[in-house]
Amino acid sequence: MSRLIVRAAAAALCALSLSGCVDSDGPILRDAEPLFGTVIRLQVYTLRKGFADEPEQASFKWDGERYVHASGGMPDITAFTVHRLEGRAYIVQSVAAKRPNIIEYAVAHKLAEGVYQVTAIDQDDADGATRKRFCKQVDESYCRIAGRNELTAFARATDARQKNEGVLVLRLADDASELPR
């Protein structure tokens, strides 16, 4: 596994401020583990129309419950966790600095070893019946969810779309000992 997924997830979650994104008023996934070790360094690119742009590097440290921003760019993502969805996909659950009491979600899809594409989970990726059943409009949220089943349904729908937008995340070596020789 790679620590990139964490970075990608964080970057994707930055994009969650768009209408249609799924959020919750607290963490839904509580079984977090440090899937990428205790310290991760990531290089993140915004994906737009098939092109990578706006490179940024950041480091995150595991605090026993989640990865917290330690240094570098992406100060808008204060913390996140990564959870297996299925196959090569993961769910990223994050806390944004601008809305610290709201949890945002993204799908990180593993493209290659150490390379992930992260896409915000969007209610519009699911069918109308799923949106009607699970989404609740609250304040500035178009789709507030409350449980694991709802999150999984929306995450699977977003993962199935295979969009060419979101964030491209590359895992960087933590130190010189990890560099290939």
Image (tube, helix red, strand yellow):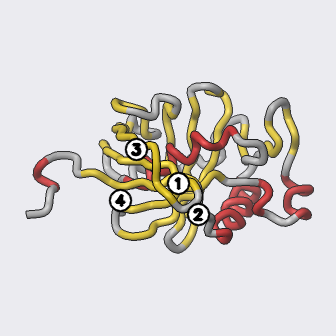
* CB within 8 Å, label 2 to label 4: no
Nearest to N terminus: mark 2 or mark 1: 1
Tag shown at residue 164: 2
- Distance between the alpha carbons at the discs numbered 3 and 4: 19 Å
Q: Nearer the viewer, residue 75 or 84?
A: 75
Q: Secondary structure at mark 4?
A: loop
- Distance between the alpha carbons at the discs numbered 2 and 3: 17 Å
Mark 4 Cα-neighbour bin, 10 Å: few <14, some 14–19, many ≥20: many
Q: Secondary structure at mark 1?
A: strand
* CB within 8 Å, label 1 to label 4: no
Q: Nearer the viewer, residue 3 or 161?
A: 161
Amino acid at pointer 4: Ser
Mark 2 Cα-neighbour bin, 10 Å: few <14, some 14–19, many ≥20: some
The residue at the point 56 percent across, 26 percent down is: 97
Residue that numbered label 1 is attached to: 47
* CB within 8 Å, label 2 to label 1: yes
Amino acid at pointer 3: Pro
Residue that numbered label 4 is attached to: 2
Nearest to N terminus: mark 2 or mark 4: 4
The residue at the point 85 percent across, 62 percent down is: 130
Nearest to N terminus: mark 2 or mark 3: 3
Residue that numbered label 3 is attached to: 55
Mark 1 Cα-neighbour bin, 10 Å: few <14, some 14–19, many ≥20: many
Q: Residue 133: image x %, image y %?
A: 90, 57
Amino acid at pointer 1: Leu
The quarter of the picture where the C terminus appears is: bottom left
30 to the left or right of 33: right
Can residue 48 be seen by looking at this rendering? yes
Q: Secondary structure at mark 2?
A: loop
Tag shown at residue 159: none
